[in-house]
């Protein structure tokens, strides 16, 4: 009578284990391509609040009350607190001692400083990235701008904003300056709550046209032209930014 546990046939060292039916060896050894890890409660709350900030539902200076958010999402305050810490690290929100969290509120000078810093750091990233630009990056920029144009025609400002950010980050995607990229990301995050305020004042078809000129500069690997176009493009937002602060000043007068 055979033993209850039969000895396994010896395999060469490093050989694959038996592969279950319906799975490839690669799927067993690595992560399944069709598997998407579910969001944690903390991630889901952070994503929802980030969306509310970048779409204008939560305006600059709006208070975020943990108890109210917990009730809104039907969960305990622990994941809410962790989500708020994440958003604070990303600079979407600011912690005020003895008061709580609020959407980051900037003065006009603060916001102009953000744009000045972006100008310096994005130029450095673009110059660093240009030697590594590939045709795939150029194609991705064209696709991104075409989708942005379509979203604009559909009257979808949220998608327009997402694609606009994606487009600009593609201009320096090939840069290896990871620390500078993180700082630029934080600068964009800090100003995100103001984009729903000044974006409607921009000539968006003109924005897409300016993107086309930037794509041509990237395709030609012309770093000086791209730097100049990027500076000019960013500067066009300054007029609308002044307008929203002037209107706020008039309203409080």
Image (cartoon, rainbow, N blue to C red):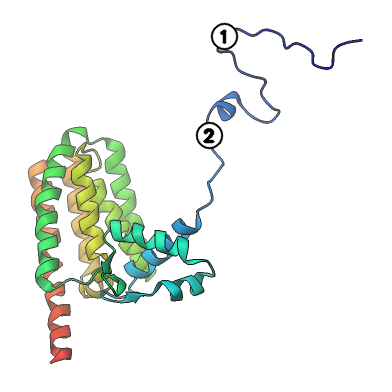
Real-space CA distance between mark 1 and mark 2, rounded to the nearest whole angstrom = 22 Å
Q: Is residue 162 above or below residue 102?
A: above
Instruction: Of the two numbered discs 1 and 2 on the same chain, state the one appearing first in sequence.
Output: 1
| Label 2 CA crowd tier, 10 Å (few <14, some 14–19, many 20+) | few
Residue 171 visible in the shown view: no
Q: Which of the pair 231/67 is nearer the observer?
A: 67
Whole-percent x and y of residue 63?
A: 32, 76
Circle 2 — which element?
Answer: loop
Image quarter hosting the N terminus: top right
Residue at point 55% right, 26% down? 29
Mark 1 lies on residue: 13
Q: Would you identify the image quadrant in which residue 59 lies?
A: bottom left
Q: Is residue 151 visible?
A: yes
**Between residues 36 and 179, which one lies in front from this camera angle?**
179
**How many numbered discs?**
2
Which residue is located at x 12 percent, y 82 percent? 246
Please state if 61 lies on the left or on the right of 65 as rendered.
left
Residue 61 occupies which quadrant of the picture? bottom left
Task: Name the foreground residue: 99 vs 59.
Answer: 99
The residue located at (25%, 42%) in the rendering is 173
Q: Which mark is residue 214?
A: none
Q: Residues within 10 Å of mark 1 (few under 14, many from 20)?
A: few
The quarter of the displayed image where residue 198 is located: bottom left
Residue that numbered label 2 is attached to: 31
Q: Is residue 231 above or below residue 14?
A: below
79 left or right of 93 in image: right
Residue 146, horizontal then vertical, whole percent: 33, 55
Residue 7 x %, y % = 75, 11
């Amino acid at each position: 009578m055979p033993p209850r546990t039969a000895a396994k046939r010896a395999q060469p060292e490093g050989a694959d284990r038996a592969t279950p039916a319906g799975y490839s060896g690669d799927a067993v050894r690595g992560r399944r391509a069709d598997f998407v890890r579910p969001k944690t409660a903390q991630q889901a709350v952070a994503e929802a609040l980030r969306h509310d900030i970048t779409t204008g539902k939560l305006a600059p200076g709006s208070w975020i009350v943990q108890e109210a958010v917990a009730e809104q999402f039907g969960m305990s305050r622990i994941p809410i607190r962790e989500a708020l810490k994440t958003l604070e690290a990303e600079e979407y929100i600011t912690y005020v001692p003895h008061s709580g969290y609020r959407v980051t509120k900037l003065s006009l000078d603060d916001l102009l400083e953000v744009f000045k810093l972006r100008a310096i750091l994005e130029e450095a990233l673009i110059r660093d990235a240009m030697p590594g630009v590939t045709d795939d990056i150029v194609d991705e920029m064209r696709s991104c701008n075409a989708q942005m144009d379509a979203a604009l025609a559909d009257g979808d400002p949220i998608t327009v904003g997402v694609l606009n950010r994606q487009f600009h980050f593609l201009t320096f995607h090939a840069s290896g300056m990871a620390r500078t990229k993180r700082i630029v990301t934080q600068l964009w995050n800090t100003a995100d709550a103001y984009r729903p305020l000044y974006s409607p004042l921009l000539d968006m078809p003109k924005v897409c046209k300016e993107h086309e000129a930037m794509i041509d500069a990237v395709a030609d690997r012309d770093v000086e032209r791209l730097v100049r176009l990027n500076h000019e493009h960013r500067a066009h937002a300054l007029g609308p930014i002044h307008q929203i602060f002037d209107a706020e000043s008039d309203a409080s007068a």
